[in-house]
Image (cartoon, rainbow, N blue to C red):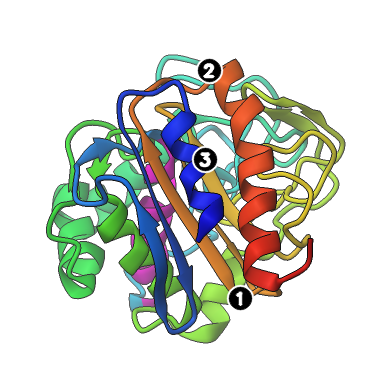
Amino acid sequence: MEALKAIDRWPVAHAAVAVVGAGGVLATRGPTALPLRIASVSKLLTAYALMIAVEEGTVALDDAAGPPGSTLRHLLAHASGYGFDSTASALAPPGTRRIYSNRGIEEAAAHLATVAGMPFATYLHEAVLEPLGLADTTLRTSAAFGIWSTVDDLARFAGELFAPRLLAPATSGEMVTVQFPGLSGVLPGVRRYDPLDWGLGFERNFATPGHWAGERVSRATYGHFGGSGTFLWLDPVAGLAVVMLADREFDEWGLAAWPSFCDAVVAEHTGRA
């Protein structure tokens, strides 16, 4: 795809991308086998493991977890009231604000580890990474932002999102359904939204003004971006997913480069200029 050549001009040392369709990888560019920290894209893999645990009956979305009154569902949907980082206390009652929270995801992973009686990294490996053949993906630090992976591995994960084998359709559908609709909040590094939509791990605020993925994706799109300069999104209307990893922290360069890049990829794929 001609649109992928744009990454060669980005102000980063390394960037790689894969475009994925329902039938597999459509195009790639850059060092797709290079392991990089995927930052908050980690949350997608973590949430997937947690939902496998929900299907298995190990945990339930209504389990009490996090601050008083919060559940596992609140934690996965950034609606528990926890602040951003691992030391932040609850800033609001559960279910009243969308406060993007690394701590909330870490607490969700810790809840599963406690109930399952094993480290979360072990559960993630056995439930998600090994079955999908993600051999170059490892949880090194935080379940919220400390997974390292490759574009090749995440393209396989995108294939799983197109046609889930590890989750039942109802469960995968629940993950991308907006939870606690109507909550306002800040999309970190981007802007405030009212509402700021989120599923269970998956951002659902695509195709809104100023969004990092541009204007051509549909409102049905779901995914996540990471502060290390990474993103993964899937648009079921276009039948298209894009995985991108880079090694420069997300800041003005990402907001300048990503929207037009994503727009160009969608336009080229759909044939609509």
Disc 1 packing (10 Å; few <14; some 14–19; many ≥20): some
Residue position marked by numbered label 2 in the rendering: 89
- Read off the magenta span: 40-55
Q: Earlier in the sequence, mark 1 or mark 3?
A: 3
Residue position marked by numbered label 1 in the rendering: 239
Where residue 84 appears, as percent x and y from the top left, is: 53, 22
Where residue 126 appears, as percent x and y from the top left, is: 15, 66
Question: Residue 180 vs residue 54: left or right?
Answer: right
| Residue 59 visible (yes or no) | no
Amino acid type of the residue that numbered disc 1 sits on in the rendered structure? Gly
Alpha carbon distance from label 2 to label 3: 41 Å
Q: Earlier in the sequence, mark 2 or mark 1?
A: 2
Q: Nearer the viewer, mark 1 or mark 3?
A: 3
The disc at residue 87 is none
Where residue 170 appears, as percent x and y from the top left, is: 57, 82
Most foreground residue, 77 or 189:
189
Amino acid type of the residue that numbered disc 3 sits on in the rendered structure? Ala
Where residue 92 appears, as percent x and y from the top left, is: 70, 25
Q: Residue at x 66, y 44 (%)?
A: 213
SS label for mark 3:
helix
Q: Indicate whether residue 53 is drawn in magenta.
A: yes
Above or below for 16 versus 204 = above
Q: Residue at x 53, y 85 (%)?
A: 169
Question: Residue 84 vs residue 28: left or right?
Answer: right
The disc at residue 6 is 3
Amino acid type of the residue that numbered disc 2 sits on in the rendered structure? Ser
Q: Earlier in the sequence, mark 2 or mark 3?
A: 3
